[in-house]
Image (cartoon, helix red, strand yellow):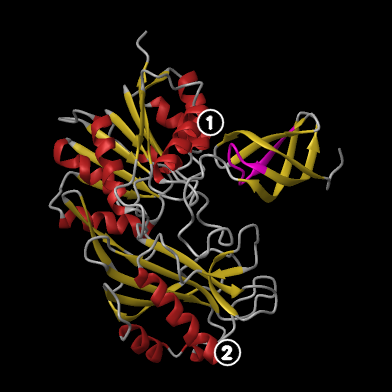
Amino acid sequence: MKKGQICEGMVERYAFPNKGYVTAEGKEFCVKGALKGQKIRFVAKKLRSGKAEGRLLEVLDRSPLEDVEPVCPHFGVCGGCAYQTMSYGNQLAVKEEQVRTLLASFVTDEIWEGIKGSPVQDAYRNKMEYSFGDAYKGGSLALGMHRKGSFHDIVTVDGCVIVDSDYNRILRAILDFYAERGVPFYQKMKHEGVLRHLVIRQTARTKELLVNLVTTTQDLNCLCLTELTEKLLALPLHGRIAGILHTHNDSLSDAVVPERVVTVYGQDHIYEQVLSLQFKISPFSFFQTNTLSAEVLYDTVRGYVGDTRDKVIFDLYSGTGTIAQLLAPVAKKVIGVEIVEEAVEAARENAARNGLDNCEFIAGDVLKVLDGIQDKPDMIVLDPPRDGIHPKALEKIIAYGVDQLVYISCKPTSLARDLGILTARGYHLARCCACDQFVSTLHVEVVALLSRKKV
């Protein structure tokens, strides 16, 4: 067996996220993107003692799990959705099995409560972040998602099915507008060009839209924003464009960095309703990307939190304060901590709008902020970013000694790592379930209730 050798085999098992395992010539390979039950052709990429990796070349025979045809014209080319060849029931079964396998050291049949599906499977995303680029080196202007397996090539996804068709119409209109004018996209290696990203947000119920064009400041005149605004407002949309923004970003990072945000038209925010509360969504504040499924998630969290009367609750990594405000009406006090200042400002506004005066929101890193909070929590809710909780921050959280923690994870591998620390420090998993927020993709949320062991 040599590196670069072409192999074939049947995928015997899989692991989160979307990793298939196949044996060839007596060696087990991990192949990303392979599904259990598929017969695949792959190339040996890394060969190490006890560990080998392969790169998927072709699916020779489909898995029995693949029982439908993909409905998206970009499937297989776009690097987004991975599960469109499976019916939704099979998608949920795959995700549940992967999470159960990943958390096998902590989860028993008695505490596992299954997986909760999304109420909507199509047009569910309320935010998309598109990139400008070219479909291949030297090709025409493209606007969309990265091509599967590529860092540079962009696929124009104007037929995407996990967003409302308004997204596709706006994307196509902006792409055509700048392609006709020959406006260049920003080339990351040369640090030259203008067009960088397009971020669109839309409310689930009112269908109001926030359109945010992200560019460098190398040539602002070529953007023709007045003409672009007229073109966008004339589009036949389901919803209404509430605001058009222009974000200046000259940073070297490929991320959307809002160095300056200009409101070109309308307002710089939209309002979303979740359960009984209303939330202001600003351009860069965190909000769950599937609003209706988020209601399922938050209702699950409320059930796990239980009786909160006369209790002080810490909501760490609180975003725009959604969880804090859902718990506040039945708690003594809720303190939210979030590192993104814009999200904290939105949380404060949201709390005032919802008539909640027992919420406090603090901007800063959880690791540093906890030292300055005088209140002591009776319960802690954790909703960290994908990479989980900083080990030092986790130690400070454990040191509070609360009887219960509720951990919401958008990356189960990070949860598994943190559970190892929490269980070693006296907590045990009392309840656990998965909530699918990301239909047709390989991602899934997990909610876990941890209780301190009684000595």
Asked if one can make out residue 448 in the rendered structure from this viewpoint, the answer is no
Residue 29 in the magenta stretch? The answer is: yes
- Is 263 situated left or right of 128 in this image? left
Of the two numbered discs 1 and 2 on the same chain, state the one appearing first in sequence.
2
Mark on residue 182?
Answer: 2
Between residue 421 and residue 127, name the one nearer to us.
127
Which quadrant of the figure has residue 408? top left
Residue 230 in percent (x, y) is at 34, 89
Q: The N terminus is located in which quarter?
A: top right
Looking at the picture, which amino acid does disc 1 mark? Arg
Looking at the picture, which amino acid does disc 2 mark? Gly
Specify the segment rendered in magenta. Answer: 28-39
Q: Label 1, secondary structure: give it.
A: helix
Above or below: residue 149 compared with residue 200:
above
Q: Residue furthest right?
A: 2
Which quadrant of the figure has residue 359? top left
Cα gap from disc 1 to disc 2, whole angstroms: 48 Å
Which quadrant of the figure has residue 2? top right
Residue 172 in percent (x, y) is at 45, 78
- Is 242 situated left or right of 248 in this image? left
Between residue 232 and residue 118, name the one nearer to us.
118
Of badges 1 and 2, nearer the viewer stands 2
Q: Residues within 10 Å of mark 1 (few under 14, many from 20)?
A: some
Between residue 28 and residue 171, name the one nearer to us.
28
Residue 18 in percent (x, y) is at 57, 42
Q: Label 2, secondary structure: give it.
A: loop
Residue matched to label 1: 417
Above or below: residue 158 compared with residue 397:
below
